[in-house]
Image (tube, helix red, strand yellow):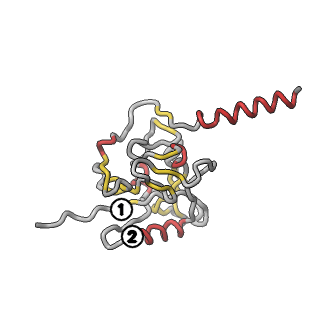
Amino acid sequence: MFTSTRLVLACAAFTCLPALSSQQCEGPLKRNAADFSAVGDGSQVFDKSNNLIWMRCIEDQTWNGSTCVAKDPDAVNPGPRVTYQQAKALAAEKSTIDERWRIPTRKELLTLREPNCYNPSQNLTVFPTKPAWSSDGAFWSSTPEAKGVSVVSAIGTSDAWASTDEANMNHVRLVRTPPPPQKK
C-alpha cells in the first residue's frame, strides 16, 4: 500500500510538470514588443532601444516563421549547450561581410531579461519559443572576469551571473550591430 501510494504521488507530480513549466509573469513587461522589429525572414529582431540585432532563437533551435522550435522539445534542457570556444566558432561561422555575429556582453544580454517573468524571463512575443521554457537557462556572454574566465549571464529565473570556466557548457544567443545607414 505504501509503495503504491508513493507511485501515485510520483505520477501525479510528473503529470503536473508541463503546467508548472509554462511562463509566469507577475507584473508589466519591462520591454514592449514595439521596442523590436523583425528583420528579413523574422529569424532576427532589431532592438530599437539598444541598436542591436538579435537572433530570435538560441543556437540549435529553428525559426519556423512564427516561433523558435527546439530540435528535441521533450528534452529536459533542449537547445545545445556549448563551450565558450564553440560559441565563438558559431558566431564566426554565421558571420558574413554584412552580418558580423558575436557573443553579447553581459550588459547587452541582460537588456532582454524580463524581471517580472520566469520560465523563461524574456518577452515571448519578441522571442517566441516552443516549448517556452526551452530558452531558459545560462547563456554565454563575452564579458571577461578578473580571473580571465568568461561570464555566464542567466536569462532564467534571475538576473544573476557567475564566473565559469570556458570549457563548461551553456546556451548562446548571438547578436550583431546593424550596419551604418547607406549614404545617398
The amino acid type found where label 2 is placed reads Ser
**Is residue 45 shown above or below 102?**
above
Q: Is residue 7 left or right of residue 57?
A: right
Residue at 32% x, 73% y is 97
- Local crowd size for mark 1, using a 10 Å CA cut-off: few (<14), some (14–19), many (≥20): many
Which circle, 2 or 1, is nearer the viewer?
2
Q: Is residue 178 left or right of residue 18?
A: left
**From mark 2 to mark 1, how far is it between C-alphas?**
9 Å
Q: Is residue 108 left or right of residue 159?
A: left
SS at badge 2:
loop
The amino acid type found where label 1 is placed reads Arg
Q: Position of residue 43 (x, y in %)?
A: 38, 55
Q: Position of residue 42 (x, y in %)?
A: 35, 53
Residue hosting label 1 = 176
Q: Is residue 72 left or right of residue 143?
A: right
**Is residue 58 shown above or below 20?**
below
Q: Residue 49 got which mark?
A: none
Decide which of 132, 164 is in the foreground and name it. Answer: 132
**Total label count?**
2
Q: Position of residue 112 (x, y in %)?
A: 41, 47
Residue hosting label 2 = 95
Residue at 74% x, 33% y is 11
SS at badge 1:
strand
Q: Position of residue 22 (x, y in %)?
A: 54, 37
Mark 1 and mark 2 in contact (Cβ < 8 Å)?
yes
- Local crowd size for mark 2, using a 10 Å CA cut-off: few (<14), some (14–19), many (≥20): some
Decide which of 163, 127 is in the foreground and name it. Answer: 127
Location of the C terminus by quadrant is bottom left
Location of the N terminus by quadrant is top right
Q: Residue furthest left?
A: 184
